[in-house]
């Protein structure tokens, strides 16, 4: 530790700290622009100049390392004179347009100009002008003349997002921030450049000129998308959400947000919002029309319909499909309602296709899969194996943490069916077709057992070990803090239970931690609410393969959210009664009643993130029109059906019924696998296999309806991506249209060559209108010219 004196106050800081760190420790503010605590030191704005004893001139606080006995003055005459001089230079070319600047009222330059700027400018020459730049649909760079070249946005791209999409061109007065020629800013974290820009150069394009910052009410909330559960500040004016920014929480999202969390609020004003209950009416000639009704009529119709189905066909004819993006309270009440009617057919694992683990688990030993360690510890890992994950797009901020670990010499290994660019140094890659994924993981298990001098699991005795497997096993065994993480693709894999069992065996051999990245904001919350079959009920796959008579659909869009979208739609169309509870108009072709329930901004609720952190929130605006919070709708419906235990008056009572205390969550978290390891199946080399990712902006109903997100590169229509060898075998030409067949379904797509896809595999995204006609998210497909 080093002792230093700042403005007459003593403080002890660690070796390698800067004067800025010491001042911050004492609560002393040093003016700055280019400095950011999460970015590297640039020291190019010079605003943080301070006086240091025995130094011949002021020094930048952000770049000056502390030494024993150092004395620093941040507000001495010499320091303030230097800071005022820097401010004068910064304002020379800065336009005087604060009244019309979107950053007005929250601008760092504006604030510091009051304290360090002169009342009048001595600069009489013409000011420079920087032309508008098009950075895409999310970030506006229309007034780059305001830029002060702090380079925060450049360093953010390089160090946090992992990709340099902005840079500085020119020198001196001609220096300016530019994107690469003809390119936009397409990172899934691009919106953070808006937050870190200290002036009005980079602003939010969807929010542009919508309101002044002092007109906005600020309310905390939790992101409803990926499993991280990022903390939000939702900014509201006139009962409308106008902007979402991060609420800093180093234990979860730090000070960052993914673009999905930041811009999905635009869906709240979508033309597809459902604002009143609607019933399907069938005329005498068979024509179907939808009629708005009041809540009493709609709920009476639902209650009567459910009662009739159960009385005529038995409780087993009723099923519930639940989205893991719903709140825990909504999910628990649906489970309570379905079980109150005598059925156990409820599931939230809509994209899962392997349910063999259910048969090996009893209700008493049911455990909740989770990350296996706190989110904040991801940065400290030194060895990581990620199995089956489209990491950057499925978990943008988890990828960011692993990126920071990789910069500290952590060895990240990838086992996947696509060689995605994670924008980090990946030490070892094993890329195999989907059917070979269990065999590839089994080879790593065998290699680890041999290297550690431990017995090889008997079913794997005949597995041959490759050099790749030895390299991955050696990496894991050489670490002191190791984690093996299963991604969404691994969970949704046709042999997902075997991947889990093999990963568990590898964890035991390497002494590491086994974790699941988990799919959605409330995957763990849905487990805790017991929204899955427990007493012989049907899982999501069985509910659709063996169509029931009645379905409750909560916040889900089965034609996009299920592993087999074709089977989902067919089952729902055959049903006697389909009740859709959603903020949006969907399911018009198969639903019988649409009940408008609130999105996350209009209701209170709870999400439990991937580390098991329980995060409750309140609604930030009033429900739109006749929309009602889902938990209230379900509570009233349960009461109308005369079911027990539906006498909740507040959402806190509902929450307490599911989770009496945080300790109950911790006790139930476990990644133990009770499925026995089996020898991997032999693969057929003459079959074309499909790899299906769920693109970041197709993943849930909100992002699918956010207009700015749908204009991004990541929201483009899916293509049939394949290796050059398969492309040539099929004798295709650039831009050729192909007909892809899978099961009973087919889709016509554009074929493109993608070096990231292994031979014999075609990558076709799921959850999109153009591909939801295919049967399943994996398996054999046929491809021919359209």
Image: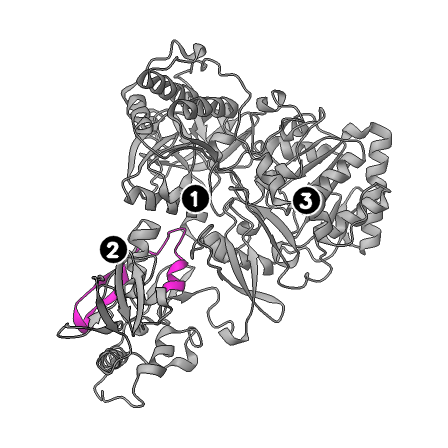
Q: Which residue is drawn at 62% across and 62% down?
A: 620
Tell me if 409 is positioned left or right of 262 in this view.
left
Q: Which of 574 and 85 is in front in this view?
A: 85
Whole-angstrom CA distance, mark 3 to mark 2, is 45 Å
Tell me if 227 is positioned left or right of 67 in this view.
right
- What SS does tag 3 mark? loop
The magenta stretch spans residue 79: no
| In this view, the mark in front (1 or 2) | 2
- What SS does tag 1 mark? helix
Q: Position of residue 262 (x, y in %)?
A: 48, 57
Residue 554 falls in which quadrant of the image? top right
The magenta stretch spans residue 173: yes
Q: Position of residue 385 (x, y in %)?
A: 37, 32
The answer to whether marks 3 and 1 mark residues whose Cβ atoms lie closer than 8 Å is no
Q: Can see residue 434?
A: no
- What SS does tag 2 mark? loop
Instruction: State which quarter of the image contains the C terminus.
Output: top left
Which residue was labeled with disc 2?
15
Marks 3 and 2, the one that precedes in the sequence: 2
Marks 1 and 2, the one that precedes in the sequence: 2
Which residue was labeled with disc 1?
393
Q: What stretch is highlighted in magenta?
A: 168-196
Whole-angstrom CA distance, mark 1 to mark 2, is 37 Å
Q: Position of residue 441 (x, y in %)?
A: 40, 22
Residue 480 falls in which quadrant of the image? top left
Q: Which of 77 and 437 is in front in this view?
A: 77
- Mark 2 closeness class: few <14, some 14–19, many ≥20 residues within 10 Å: few
Q: Residue at x 57, y 26 (%)?
A: 744
Question: Which disc, if any, is residue 660?
Answer: 3
């Amino acid at each position: 530790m080093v002792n230093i004196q700042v403005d007459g106050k003593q403080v002890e800081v660690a070796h390698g700290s800067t004067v800025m760190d010491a001042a911050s420790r004492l609560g002393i503010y040093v003016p700055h622009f280019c400095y950011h605590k999460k970015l590297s030191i640039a020291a190019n704005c010079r605003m943080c100049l301070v006086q240091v004893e025995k130094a011949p001139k002021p020094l930048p606080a952000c770049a000056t390392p502390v030494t024993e006995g150092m004395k620093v003055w941040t507000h001495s005459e010499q320091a303030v004179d230097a800071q005022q001089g820097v401010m004068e230079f910064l304002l020379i070319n800065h336009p005087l347009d604060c009244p019309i600047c979107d950053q007005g009222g929250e601008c760092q330059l504006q604030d510091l100009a009051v304290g360090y700027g002169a009342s009048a400018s001595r600069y009489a020459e013409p000011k420079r002008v920087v032309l508008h730049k098009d950075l895409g649909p999310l970030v506006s760079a229309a007034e780059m003349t305001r830029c002060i070249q702090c380079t925060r946005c450049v360093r953010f791209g390089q160090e946090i997002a992992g990709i340099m999409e902005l840079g500085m061109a020119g020198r001196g007065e001609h220096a300016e921030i530019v994107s690469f020629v003809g390119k936009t800013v397409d990172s899934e974290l691009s919106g953070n450049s808006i937050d870190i820009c200290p002036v009005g150069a980079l602003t939010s394009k969807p929010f542009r000129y919508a309101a002044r910052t002092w007109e906005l009410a600020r309310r905390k909330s939790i992101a409803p998308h990926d499993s991280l559960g990022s903390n939000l500040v939702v900014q509201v004016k006139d009962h409308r959400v106008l902007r979402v920014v991060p609420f800093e929480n180093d234990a979860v999202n730090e000070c960052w947000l993914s673009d999905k969390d930041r811009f999905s609020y635009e869906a709240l004003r979508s033309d597809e919002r459902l604002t009143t209950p609607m019933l399907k009416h069938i005329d005498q000639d068979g024509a179907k029309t939808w009629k708005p009704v009041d809540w009493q009529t709609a709920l009476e119709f639902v209650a009567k319909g459910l009662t009739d189905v159960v009385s005529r066909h038995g409780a087993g004819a009723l099923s519930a499909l639940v989205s893991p993006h719903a709140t825990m309270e909504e999910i628990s009440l649906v489970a309570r309602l379905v079980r109150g009617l005598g059925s156990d057919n409820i599931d939230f694992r809509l994209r899962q296709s392997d349910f063999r683990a259910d048969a090996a688990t009893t209700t008493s030993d049911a455990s909740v899969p989770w990350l296996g360690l706190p989110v904040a510890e991801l940065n400290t890992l030194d060895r990581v194996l990620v199995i089956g994950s489209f990491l950057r797009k499925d978990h943008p901020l988890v990828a960011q943490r692993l990126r920071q670990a990789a910069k500290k010499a952590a060895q990240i290994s990838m086992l996947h069916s696509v060689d995605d660019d994670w924008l980090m140094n990946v030490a070892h890659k094993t890329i195999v077709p989907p059917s070979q994924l269990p065999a590839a993981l089994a080879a790593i298990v065998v290699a680890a057992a041999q290297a550690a001098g431990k017995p090889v699991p008997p079913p794997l005795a005949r597995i041959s070990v490759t050099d790749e497997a030895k390299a991955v096993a050696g990496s894991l065994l050489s670490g002191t803090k190791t984690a093996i993480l299963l991604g969404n693709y691994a969970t949704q894999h046709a042999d997902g239970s075997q991947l889990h069992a093999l990963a568990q065996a590898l964890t035991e051999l390497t002494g590491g931690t086994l974790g699941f990245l988990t799919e959605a904001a409330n995957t763990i919350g849905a487990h805790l609410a017991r929204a899955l079959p427990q007493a012989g009920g049907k899982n999501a796959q069985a509910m659709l393969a063996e169509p029931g008579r009645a379905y409750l659909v909560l916040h889900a869009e089965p034609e996009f959210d299920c592993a087999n979208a074709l089977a989902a739609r067919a089952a729902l169309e055959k049903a006697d009664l389909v009740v859709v509870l959603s903020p949006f108009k969907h399911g018009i072709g198969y639903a019988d009643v649409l009940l408008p329930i609130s999105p996350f901004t209009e209701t209170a609720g709870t999400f439990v993130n991937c580390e098991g952190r329980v995060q409750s929130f309140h609604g930030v605006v009033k429900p739109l029109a006749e929309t009602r919070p889902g938990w209230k709708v379900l509570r009233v419906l349960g009461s109308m059906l005369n079911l027990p235990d539906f006498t909740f008056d507040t959402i806190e009572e509902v929450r307490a019924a599911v989770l009496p205390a945080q300790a109950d969550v911790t006790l139930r978290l476990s990644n133990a696998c009770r499925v026995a390891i089996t020898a991997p199946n032999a693969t057929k080399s003459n079959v074309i296999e499909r790899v299906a990712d769920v693109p970041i902006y197709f993943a849930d109903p909100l992002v699918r309806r956010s207009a700015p997100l749908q204009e991004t590169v990541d929201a483009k229509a899916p293509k049939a991506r394949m290796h050059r060898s398969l492309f040539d075998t099929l004798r295709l030409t650039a831009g050729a249209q192909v007909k892809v067949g899978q099961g009973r379904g087919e889709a016509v797509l554009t074929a493109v060559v993608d070096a990231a896809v292994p031979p014999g595999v075609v990558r076709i995204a799921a959850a999109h209108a153009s591909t939801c006609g295919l049967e399943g998210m994996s398996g054999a497909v046929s491809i021919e010219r359209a």
